[in-house]
């Protein structure tokens, strides 16, 4: 009996310990690469992103940051209205338990980035492929922050509370999922969590979204922000134990059957479900849906039971880049079939609509300076802002991420366009100021922006490589003669060098 009582006591103690520890359910495997930030292990340096020594990021992840302050940033009052005096790109590093055990939640490593005495807007993202469209996903990550205000101007570089926050500045922490797989953290397609604080404590941030593509992208964001006199000497963000899990397929909820009685139901009998959305008729007979906040094209297709491909086809001319939609926009659900006009009433022939084309852009590291990309040795570069315009003004703008390019501006009508680009910090362009190009019906132009370190930093066009959608537009293909002349010049230069060496040698031999 004595040993039986001891066994029961031990089991109760284990049960009590289990009840006291929080348990977070995970419906499926972690879809992220290196979600625990342990890849590589302690003592092995993480790679430098784009060769920048201050940007050292865990494998599988990619950093994003703003080198210049955004329009909504507020200058501290010691900057005289110039917010750039307090702005900077943060430094990205790994943190190990043997250095700062309280900055690692589990395992041996976590990701850190910080901006000493500087405001910033930055974070990490990871693009995940192989997702089944319509899958509901949950992104979870543990975050801890540290921000410290000095006690006085004489001790501007000392935190009076050690490694704990003192009068911390807002950090605007949120996490997000782009269900379309885009890599722009500021895109309207990103589903964000509410902003929260994580001062000196590991805090769980979560967000859910339904995949609209076979790729999704998860984001971790922060923005250090203060307006008072003293800057914050620590604006640290620590990240650990991230996961992306599938929660199952998102399916529309079926409506309950109508009431069997013909009498009007009482308040207690009223159904608790929300009625299905009703389409709005237009004078031309088409049925449309007016986009509300939170709507997505995939969600509209689910609401009305319309195949997504049909919805995209019906609205091909009104969708933005990456099938973007906007609040208040009319999404056509269906249109009546045209009734033939009686033969007695002839109608003029309709002018055919020109076939739309697209301009595709990318930015690359032009290592050999020839202005032509060699994909094997010249990598894509992020943070180049590429602008497409025509005589009517701005057509589109895109910031490269260095991963998913080329990016295409779709649905363009035949016209004269201009391409210009603003290089990222530390790079300059290898070319003139702007490029004019003509887009043929149904054509495609690929514009590759050559960038070099320390080159001129002006706005540049790209090297344009036209392609065509049909044999009829084959006349728009580039001539081979410029390439022939370029190689002829190179060969001629080599021959001149050889002659310059051989002539003195021959003269010396003749003197013997």
Image (tube, helix red, strand yellow):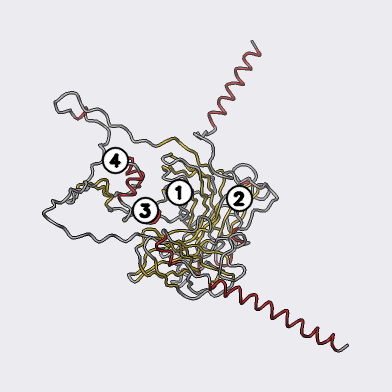
Q: Are marks 3 and 4 in contact (CB under 8 Å)?
A: no
Question: Foreground: 501 or 251?
Answer: 501
Label disc, if present, on residue 324 of the rendered structure: 3
Marks 2 and 1 sit apart, C-alpha to C-alpha, by 20 Å
Q: Name the mark nearer the viewer: 4 or 1.
A: 4
Marks 2 and 3 sit apart, C-alpha to C-alpha, by 30 Å
Sequence-first disc among 3 and 1? 1
Marks 4 and 1 sit apart, C-alpha to C-alpha, by 27 Å
Badge 2 density bin: few <14, some 14–19, many ≥20, Cα 10 Å: some
Residue at screen point 77% across, 82% down: 502
Q: Position of residue 142 (x, y in %)?
A: 53, 45
Q: Position of residue 107 (x, y in %)?
A: 63, 42
Q: Position of residue 400 (x, y in %)?
A: 49, 60
**Residue 415 horizontal side relative to residue 483, left or right:** left
Residue 3 lies, with reference to residue 108, above or below; the image says above
Residue at screen point 42% across, 58% down: 469
Q: Name the mark nearer the viewer: 2 or 1.
A: 2
Label disc, if present, on residue 176 of the rendered structure: 1
Q: Would you name the residue on which mark 2 appears?
A: 59
Badge 4 density bin: few <14, some 14–19, many ≥20, Cα 10 Å: some
Question: Foreground: 3 or 56?
Answer: 56
Q: Would you name the residue on which mark 4 appears?
A: 304
Badge 3 density bin: few <14, some 14–19, many ≥20, Cα 10 Å: some
Q: Are marks 2 and 1 in contact (CB under 8 Å)?
A: no
Sequence-first disc among 4 and 2? 2
**SS type, badge 4:** helix
């Amino acid at each position: 009996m004595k040993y039986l009582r001891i066994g029961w006591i031990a089991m109760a103690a284990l049960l009590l310990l289990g009840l006291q520890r929080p348990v977070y359910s995970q419906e499926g495997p972690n879809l992220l690469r290196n979600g625990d930030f342990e890849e590589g292990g302690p003592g092995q340096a993480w790679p430098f992103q784009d060769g920048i020594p201050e940007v050292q990021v865990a494998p599988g992840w990619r950093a994003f940051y703003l080198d210049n302050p955004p329009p909504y940033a507020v200058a501290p009052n010691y900057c005289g209205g110039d917010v750039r005096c307090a702005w900077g790109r943060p430094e990205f590093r790994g943190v190990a338990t043997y250095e700062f055990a309280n900055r690692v939640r589990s395992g041996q490593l976590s990701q850190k980035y910080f901006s000493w005495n500087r405001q910033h807007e930055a974070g990490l993202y990871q693009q995940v492929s192989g997702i089944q469209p319509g899958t509901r996903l949950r992104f979870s990550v543990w975050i801890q922050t540290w921000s410290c205000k000095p006690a006085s101007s004489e001790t501007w570089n000392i935190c009076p509370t050690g490694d704990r926050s003192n009068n911390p500045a807002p950090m605007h922490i949120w996490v997000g999922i782009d269900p379309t797989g885009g890599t722009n953290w500021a895109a309207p397609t990103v589903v964000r969590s509410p902003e929260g604080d994580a001062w000196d404590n590991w805090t769980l941030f979560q967000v859910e979204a339904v995949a609209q593509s076979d790729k999704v992208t998860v984001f971790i964001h922060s923005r250090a922000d203060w307006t008072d006199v003293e800057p914050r000497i620590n604006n640290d963000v620590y990240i650990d134990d991230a996961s992306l899990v599938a929660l199952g397929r998102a399916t529309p909820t079926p409506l309950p059957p109508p009431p069997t009685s013909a009498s009007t139901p009482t308040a207690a009998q009223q159904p608790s479900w929300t009625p299905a959305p009703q389409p709005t008729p237009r004078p031309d007979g088409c049925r449309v849906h007016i986009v509300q906040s939170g709507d997505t094209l995939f969600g509209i297709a689910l609401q009305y039971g319309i195949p997504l491909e049909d919805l995209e086809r019906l609205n091909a001319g009104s969708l933005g880049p990456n099938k973007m939609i906007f609040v208040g926009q009319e999404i056509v659900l269906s249109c009546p079939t045209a009734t033939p006009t009686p033969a007695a009433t002839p109608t003029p022939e309709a002018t055919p609509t020109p076939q739309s084309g697209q301009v595709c852009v990318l930015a690359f590291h032009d290592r050999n300076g020839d202005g032509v990309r060699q994909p094997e040795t010249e990598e894509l570069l992020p943070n180049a802002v590429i602008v497409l315009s025509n005589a009517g003004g701005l057509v589109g703008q895109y910031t490269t991420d260095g991963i998913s390019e080329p990016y295409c501006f779709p649905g363009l009508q035949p016209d004269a366009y201009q391409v210009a680009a603003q290089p990222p910090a530390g790079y300059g362009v290898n070319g003139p100021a702007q490029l004019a190009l003509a887009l043929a019906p149904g054509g495609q132009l690929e514009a590759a922006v050559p960038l070099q370190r320390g080159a001129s930093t002006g706005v540049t066009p790209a090297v344009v490589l036209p392609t065509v959608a049909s044999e009829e537009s084959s006349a728009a293909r580039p001539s081979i003669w410029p390439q022939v002349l370029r190689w002829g010049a190179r060969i001629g230069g080599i021959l001149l060098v050889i002659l310059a060496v051989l002539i003195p040698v021959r003269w010396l031999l003749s003197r013997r």
